[in-house]
Image (spheres, rainbow, N blue to C red):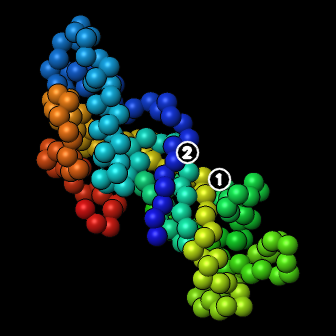
Amino acid sequence: MTYDLIEIDNDLEEPITLPEAKAYMQIDADYSSNDSVINLAISTARIRLEQYLNVGLINRDVKVQWNGREINLPLFPNGEIDNILLNEETDPLEPSLYTASRGRSKKLVINSKMCFGGGGNWWYSRINMTAEFTPNNFTENQIDTDIYTCTYNTGYTDLPSDLKQAILAETSYIYNLHGSPVTDLISPNAARLAQGYSHNLVL
């Protein structure tokens, strides 16, 4: 199962500021020629760390799209779920049609659905979550093709200092590459500072 994470707000306020980044990198505050490059490095560093850790470093609403009946919502910590849409439908699923685990890391399970009659009209029915599917209530093709879109709140409202320092370290790493390709792995300093915060199953 794969998923796509969709940002709703593309003008996010980064958790560290340009002056903070310049002070960390010991760049004169009055030297502004590379400010746009530093701002880009800040955003890139934050995104890379979010992907590496599966942790939201900015509190915001996001959308995740996936196929299948269950998903561990990305970007810990997970807050309130706003709505869940099925395929191209505009009306959200009723809360009785899905189950979200409690806590700051949520597993979302879509309850079974059954089709009665024709015309493409679907009626949803909650059944025992451990029940096995049969051809009479859910075909394999339906499992593979249904796309769900969940809008929910995610990310830290009060970012731990270690993660803020990790963003600064990664910003410095990216900035000092001077346009060279960035590797898939985050910098050793950022990895050390972010140690213990990961919510990825595999690193």
Residue 113: x and y, percent? 71, 78
Q: Between residue 56 and residue 174, name the one nearer to us.
A: 174
How far apart, in angstroms, are the residues tagged by discs 1 and 2? 9 Å
- The secondary element bearing badge 2 is classed as strand
Q: Between residue 96 and residue 186, name the one nearer to us.
A: 186
Q: Quadrant of residue 41 in the image?
A: top left
Instruction: Judge whether residue 43 can be spotted in this image.
Output: yes
Q: Looking at the image, how many numbered discs can be counted on the residues?
A: 2
Instruction: Judge whether residue 164 can be spotted in this image.
Output: no
Q: Is residue 117 left or right of residue 21?
A: right
Disc 1 vs disc 2: Cβ atoms closer than 8 Å? yes
Say which label, 1 or 2, has the lower sequence index: 2
**Classed neighbour count for the residue bearing mark 2: other residues with Cα under 10 Å, few (<14), some (14–19), many (≥20):** some
Residue 181: x and y, percent? 20, 39
**Classed neighbour count for the residue bearing mark 1: other residues with Cα under 10 Å, few (<14), some (14–19), many (≥20):** few
The disc placed on residue 82 is 1
- The secondary element bearing badge 1 is classed as strand
Residue 165: x and y, percent? 24, 38
User: Which amino acid type corresponds to the residue marked 2 in the rendered image?
Assistant: Asp
Disc 2 designates what residue? 61
Q: Is residue 84 left or right of residue 58?
A: right
Residue ID at (47%, 33%): 12
Q: Is residue 163 left or right of residue 61?
A: left
User: Which amino acid type corresponds to the residue marked 1 in the rendered image?
Assistant: Asp
Q: Between residue 160 and residue 166, name the one nearer to us.
A: 166
Residue ID at (62%, 79%): 141
